Amino acid sequence: MPLVAPDLRRPMPADPQVPDGDRTRTRRRWGAVAALVAGALALAGCTSPKNQSDASERPQITHDVPAELSRFYEQQVEWTECGDLECATVEVPLDWEDPEGDVITLAVNRSTATGSDVIGSLLTNPGGPGGSGVEALEGIVMERVGKEIAERYDIVGFDPRGVAGSQPVECVDGEQMDEIVSADPDYSTEAGVQEAEDRFGALGEACLQNTGELLEHVDTVSAARDMDVLRAVLGDETLTYLGYSYGTQLGATYAALYPEKVGRMVLDGALDPTLSADELAQGQAVGFESALRAYVEDCRTGASCPLTGSVEDGMAQVKKVLDRARRNPIPTDDPDRPLTGSLAFSGIAQSLYAPDLWPWLTRGLQGALANDGSTLLFLADFYYDRQDDGTYASNSTEAFWAINCADDRSPSDLESMKASAAQIEAAAPTIGYYFSYGGVVCAQWPVPEAGGLDSYAAEGAAPILVIGTTNDPATPYAWAESLSALLSSGVLLTYEGEGHTAYGRSNECVDDAVDTYLLTGEAPADGTRC
């Protein structure tokens, strides 16, 4: 199963040697992004200007709605001030196959347009699955989108079903989560594989007990249907949308379900929804291996690099750290929490999402090679949103597992997992082990798989802008190529660089192309490279 994809959560210091007060953030250098593109970007002290137009005056769009869905599409949404934003809740069916049954609520917020010439709403999703769009919204407004976008759009965040402030997936407490994310299964033995399956099976049962019927309905197709209710109650004829990472799968699913309602849609850091869970895992393994190699090449040019010799020597030294931590966890500044192999990998992966985070990896490897795993443990905790008191600040990881198990499951029979692991580790010899045996996660999941769609072509949709970064670790560039080809109206924009996603953190070529598209509807030429 692929990683939770960090991108739009609380900002992490770009340079571990620089005091917080000396750091600056600009839109063009938003590389200090964090753990679980999934999640919440809270910028203390940042404000979002109040709207000079009245967003609530736009009428709801409810035509061509089946009678059994009218209560959702015609609901009156009450917006209230929450800090510098506006917040609301929106009701959607728990089960889209039974819209007259139980309902759930979605948490929604928005930064209202600051100008008078308002185009409409721009719905956003930061990724994951499991990321809180509500928590990410302020960062997207302040750090990602262009000034004119914020002037002419109400920029809207929402928590998909199962996530954060919407009706959430709830599973285990902090102590139990610690045990799960730090575990180092021995996949070389049948008993070790069974132990891992049983651990996730117990997690799934806890999720079902604490979440209830919702656990069976957190799939991406249901979440995409929710987005059409949001479009309608926001008063938009078509959906204008900005999705990062997993948010691209959500957007592509919406386009396939409602091609005639696609407006201006930007899918950045693309996922190909037709790939199997094993194919996604192998793609990410190769992506992170490539990003790690780029880091090692760069590290060798610095005076503080703890890696010696050639690039291959450096990769081998990183693998030695991981292997050692798995066999004999490395001490940290918390005597009760040594650095296991799984935690070491999570800390390394956290640092590969943007080059601005590479100094943290250097510091982490310096410590680990000197028998101190404290920095890599700090990075792993940041990755999983773990707080100093042992609690987890969000349900991002639990929602990630639940949504992935709802959408698609790797084969869980031992021989299939062994064959897949051999392919993954051959393609990514340094870190491939940590992408292997993904079938154990959902092998005993207590609710059935919902699955995806038969086709994602979205015939008849307006042009959809797909963005890929050539050395993106979490969503490899090949996925952007395949998604843009898969969509009947896909347009590919390429950023030649490092890091996860591009709009708002890469260069003016990308930013200007996206801004122009969102403001005018004019997409760049297919195949444009920046």
Image (tube, rainbow, N blue to C red):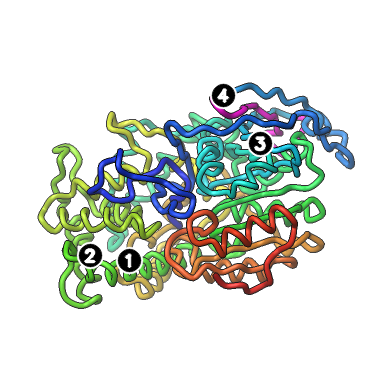
Three-letter residue code for mark 2: Val
Residue behind mark 4? 82
Q: Is residue 378 visible?
A: yes
Give how far apart the Cα atoms at labels 3 and 2 are: 48 Å
Residue behind mark 1? 292
Residues at discs 1 and 2 in contact (Cβ within 8 Å): yes
Q: Residues within 10 Å of mark 1 (few under 14, many from 20)?
A: many
Image point (78%, 47%), residue name:
238
Residue mark closest to the camera, 4 vs 3: 3
Q: Which mark is residue 318?
A: 2
Residue mark closest to the camera, 1 vs 2: 1
Three-letter residue code for mark 4: Cys
Q: Position of residue 281 (x, y in %)?
A: 45, 63
Three-letter residue code for mark 3: Thr
Marks 1 and 3, the one that precedes in the sequence: 3
* Magenta-drawn segment: 83-100
